[in-house]
Amino acid sequence: MSLSADDVAKIAHLARLAVAPGENAALGRELSNILDLVAQMDAADTAGVVPMAHPLDMAQRLRDDAVSEQNSRDRYQAGAPAVENGLFLVPKVIE
Amino acid sequence: MELHERSIAQLSAGLRSGEVSSTELTKHMLQRIRMHDAALNSFITVTEELALTQAKAADARIADGTAGALTGIPIAHKDIFCTRDVRTSCGSRMLKDFVSPYDATVVENLQRAGVVMLGKTNMDEFAMGSSNETSHFGPVRNPWDRETVPGGSSGGSAAAVAARLCIAATGTDTGGSIRQPAALTGITGLKPTYGRCSRWGMIAFASSLDQAGPMTRSAEDAALMLTGMAGFDERDSTSAQRPVDDYVAALGQDIRGVRIGIVREFMGEGLDAGVGASIQVAIDELKRLGAEIVEVSLPNAGLSVPAYYVVAPAECSSNLARFDGVRYGHRCAAPKDLEDLYKRSRSEGFGPEVKRRIMIGTYALSAGYYDAYYLKAQKIRQLIADDFRKAFAECDVIVGPTAPSTAFRIGEKADDPVSMYLSDIYTIAVNLAGLPGMSIPVQPSAGMPVGLQLIGGLFDEARLLNVAHQLQLATDWHRQAPAGF
């Protein structure tokens, strides 16, 4: 498995990471080495095996549709990079 | 015996008898941190003032007779656990100034039991690493040899417990992050069954694997700490809804006739000869204590590292999507638009190993690759769990090495991610199957600690702790301490 500089740029965009164009090739080699390790999975015969999503054989627990949280907005927003009137501020999205 | 050398049970007795107060004990431990931690870097934050307040409250509980086994005992939390009004960095630049607005359930449970928090320990960034070198706050040094790593990702907790800077610590284990550092620093570490300790307030890495557990100097201390940490929590949707066993009561059992399984695949190629010899000494000791030794096989264990490096990065890429520079954590300067805000905040906030894993996970989950990667890995996970089910039909507890070698040198594997990943070759299968696993110190190799891994069936923590305790009653490997601390 070998990832090209273009592949790396595409993955970085999907992951919302900024990778400088000069780093793409080196990062591609590092990621390809990891994918080579992962490719050892191909040797396993998994025909008919039920995928295991969770270690415990349990059903999703449900709860009553009742209010369980108090409003702690101010406390939770205290650590935000930029807030105003209880709203998170971001750069303009719609021109 | 000096205060910091005593077990939790001994300290608890001393606190109740009035021989020592929690305030005195806490001051003693804070003094040790001041004296020794510059050489180790095991703490990111020391919460001196809070510790003394909690110690005072513990002393009041001891005086009025409402104290429990952990009341007044000074411990440290891995900096992955959210602690209210205290910085919770997860070893990352992304959260270097994050002050948590709430406590993790594990923190809350231990607080209710009356422990004193000395501070928050260093760790690999977002728990991704096996050497504690990926921390934004710098590497932790192994107290047994400061040129070597303490293991990771709970390397700060391991080094602090090994150097007796705290009586016990919490850790988390996604692929070996409690057991491997416990092995490399000569302490006892337990990763419980998936779901035994609540994940609420524990910063998520790979949600189907993450589990909290105690890091201590003995199995007896681990039993006491786990009792304080474990339990059902409705705020964690995968918390196990079953009562917590009496781990302390289970410690008294003879291990005659207990069937100990030795995994053929773990004792061969790739295992350092000195480590292998120490493991054999421990197996012989278990046999001498009356355990029955049987050979078992985990034929698919070799696939655990490849499958893990799909499952863990995939879940990490999803979990770490929350760090967007908007609600909390690092934000880049002067973003030109929203996409630039996301991309630069994340790239500046995350270190190289975290970025690598996010990208591997993003790739594995991207359109067209799901079946080849994530689904295939989940099928291999099933094969590995089946191997364990078959092995546990023939034995009660599996033992073997925790790590393939003793502590490696700082920098030795830092530039080779794949070689670093193989440090967890014996521990990862246990997380994939959701089983409890433990590491306890055995005979050192060339002066450096070696860990014996014990693996049990689902929710068999009590038996693991008892086997470890019986071995520790008959040997003194767990009492050895690094020189100079």
Image (cartoon, rainbow, N blue to C red):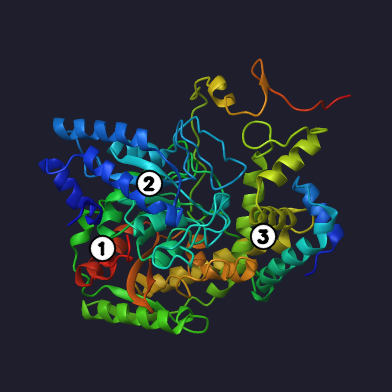
Mark 3–mark 2 distance (CA, rounded to whole Å): 38 Å
Residue located beneath label 1 in the image: B466
Q: Position of residue A13 (x, y in %)?
A: 80, 48
Q: What chain letter is assigned to the residue under label 1?
A: B
Residue under disc 2 on the same chain as residue under disc 1: yes
- Of the two numbered discs 2 and 1 on the same chain, state the one appearing first in sequence: 2
- Image quadrant holding the N terminus of chain B, namely bottom left
Above or below B274: residue B205: above
* Kind of residue indicated by mark 2: Ala
Q: Name which residue lies at 69% across and 67% down.
A: A34
**Helix, strand or loop under label 3:** helix
Asked if residue B276 lies left or right of residue A41, the reply is left
- Of the two numbered discs 3 and 2 on the same chain, state the one appearing first in sequence: 2
Q: Position of residue B103 (x, y in %)?
A: 44, 34
Residue located beneath label 3 in the image: B375
Q: Name which residue lies at 37% across and 47% down.
A: B34
Asked if residue B188 lies left or right of residue A18, the reply is left
Disc 1 packing (10 Å; few <14; some 14–19; many ≥20): many
Dot 2 and dot 1 residues touching (CB under 8 Å): no
Residue located beneath label 2 in the image: B76
* Kind of residue indicated by mark 3: Leu
- Of the two numbered discs 1 and 3 on the same chain, state the one appearing first in sequence: 3
Observer-nearest of B373 and B177: B177
